[in-house]
Image (cartoon, rainbow, N blue to C red):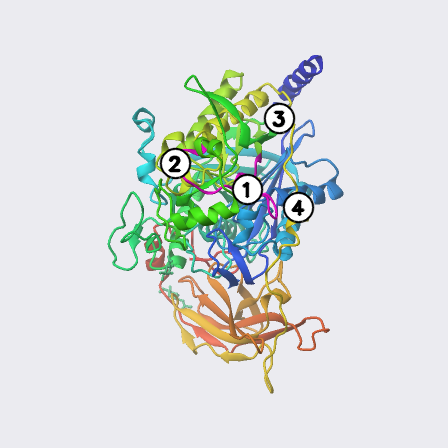
Amino acid sequence: MLLLSVATVLVVLTSSTAVQAQGLEAGVGYADITGPAGEVPMMGYAEASQKTAGIHMRLFARAFAFRDAEGRSAAFVNVDAGMISPMMKLKVIEILKSKLGSTYTEANVLLSATHTHSGPGGYHGYTLYAISTLGYFADTFNTLANGIARSIELAHASLRPTKLQFNSGQLANSGVNRSPTSYLLNPESERARYEHNTDRDMTVVKLVDANSGKPFGMLNWFAVHPTSMNNTNLLISGDNKGWAAQAFERFMDYQAGTNTLPGGQRFVASFANANEGDVSPNTDGPRCMDTGEPCDIATSTCGGKAKHCVASGPGKDMLDSTRIIGLKQFGRAMELFDSAKEELAVDSVSYSHQYVDMSNQQLTVNGRRVRTCPPAMGFSFAAGTTDGPGGFDFTQGDTSGNPFWNLVRGILSKPNQEQINCHSPKPILLNTGYMTFPTDWQPKVIETQLLKIGPLVIVALPGEFTTMSGRRVREAVQKALADNGMTGAKVVLSGVSNLYSSYVTTFEEYQAQRYEAASTIFGPHTLSAYVQQFGKLAAALATNTAVQSEIHPPNNLGSIKGWSFVSPIVYDSVGINRNFGDVVQQPASSYSAGQTVSAKFRTGHPRNNMMLGGTFLLVQKKTENGGWVDICNDACVETRFSWVRTNGVLGRSEAHIEWDIPACAQPGIYRLKHFGWYKPVLIWESPKSFSGTTNEFTVKNSSLRRFLRRTGYTIDVINGKIGGGCLL
Ligand SMILES: *[C@@H]1O[C@H](CO)[C@@H](O)[C@H](O)[C@H]1NC(C)=O
Ligand SMILES: *[C@@H]1O[C@H](CO)[C@@H](O)[C@H](O)[C@H]1NC(C)=O
């Protein structure tokens, strides 16, 4: 106790001097975490047929390091991945420890996933989340762990005196509540305090170099699912969040006169998620794919079946929707960034962190003693959502069960009466809390964390919180901070952080048992337990009291490692008198902006070399003296590298390369290049590199203005030349 008060006095003393000295240092870093681009199941939709086959955009870990005048550090990383897993975070900390000692720990590093559904899987240690990815896959796991650690190292190495400027505002028409009937079950008095059934708040923090006055980074939070790319997409993609981040970085680099391609960015922009649990980017809403009619709203079915009820829009296809929802986030972020004036006085950098057993929390709700339950998933979980319906004929809002699954479930683990009562009214499909083979099916020990950068308090949500759930957590944190003397805090929710534990709905939403409720794994009081826990962490943060963890999550890496069913690459071949890199389909001789150039090459398996930090393609433009300048690579949102198997037995495949010519493209002579590696038929030989080049083609002049108006953003901001080429 004495020690604590001495520490508090020290903080008070240093904070008054720190205000003058501007004690805060910050740094940014990023690393390529694209991972294996061929035949690896993607993580997100749990759709078995959705395996990687190329790249739409590269994925990045974007890190922000902070250090106060006392040398206390913290790091926030926005990761272009579906989720974070505890074993991944532990590995990141282990790597950092070997390089930077004890500067970064589990407690002061916050890893937030964007929750893109188009990244390779294989990094989960809990069985339920590993089933659809065919278990563990080392290439994905290592790429993520090494990349995230590297991004933090780079951010740490670039620490410099920094000023933070804050802004927030609303962004409309970029998401819809996909379980609106559940939302309506929340108390009317509570709903009356909010205008909309999704949070439209966007938060922006601008990082400005205190010496040069130049901005070098941006943190952004906005709640929306990155499911603009649907479950038929096979190209690795950052989805709408990745699109927004790339646009922001390319634009900032262009403005600063550093015309780099994506992957070589200087400015780092993070578009993180928030309470996106029930927020779909498919703003045209769900329709029956077979009839075009609206779905049944309470169950999200068409003729009683979930699989035909799919949400889409606002674009003409999923790439267009990704662009539109990405552009909206980018555009609003840029406005808020440009007008961010409120300076955050950073007195200290600190954190509050604790592992808790969420399967057994006791709490009092409305004067009643209640508890959380060991994990279980309800029947509606298997129905999926309108962003990606499940393959089984389950429907959302099922409270009775299905006899076939009752049987299968019985074989897996039959819930006892206590567990059934605990989860009621959820009918239990998977009694995951009691399923431990080959590893625990779902987590019980949950990491809870708050990071404090001066008045900015970041809440690490350990799963997908619905709109109202997030609001309750934010309010509880705000109140606990204020009650303990920290007024004026800016509390932001950071979604899908540190681990994945499926969804969290409110008690009221839970009663309807739609997908999000069926996936609320610790029972009806899950949210109340989180509200209590985050309130406790906030009080500790405000009073500078250390919180200890009495338990720790298991590191499942050792036990999941042996469960790896992704098929290996045997060999690649092209046949007699043919070469890897041969162009089998040339582009046309001339194009206009707005058209798509395409070419096909003979290629090898993309997993022979993941090309981290490199590229499978280049768009090049001829210079006046006959040389070539790179216009875009495979990270660019306007290019696509698709890997197509043409003959599995003979090991033949093609690379289909496409470039959507932006309206702002400079007229001139262009060509496409493809880079790859093949595995020789003599299987003891190691992979060899090759490249191929198309014929030249012409891009004609076009009218830039018309196109930019259609995007709905001002011509001044996007004047058409972003990052070595142009983007829109
Ligand atoms: C996915 O989007 C494409 C358009 O890009 C569309 O043709 C397809 O029907 C959609 N599929 C699903 C299951 O949403
Ligand atoms: C392209 O078109 C624009 C307007 O349509 C014109 O201003 C510009 O000079 C043209 N550029 C070339 C290289 O022809």
> In this orientation, which residue lies closer to the viewer: 29 or 716?
29
Which quarter of the picture shows residue 574? bottom right
Q: Counting residues from the N terminus, which is met first, the one under dot 4 or under dot 1?
A: 4
Q: Which residues are magenta?
A: 423-445
Report the amino acid beneath label 2: Asp
The secondary structure type at the circle numbered 1 is: loop
In the picture, measured across the screen, residue 538 lies left or right of residue 378, that is right
What is the x, y in percent for residue 601?
53, 76
Quadrant into which the N terminus falls: top right
What is the x, y in percent for residue 683?
69, 74
Give the Cα separation between the discs numbered 3 and 1.
Answer: 36 Å
Label 3 with label 1: CB-CB less than 8 Å: no
| Picture disc at residue 199 | 2
The secondary structure type at the circle numbered 4 is: helix
> In this orientation, which residue lies closer to the viewer: 452 or 97?
97
What is the x, y in percent for residue 655?
52, 71
Give the Cα separation between the discs numbered 3 and 2.
Answer: 29 Å
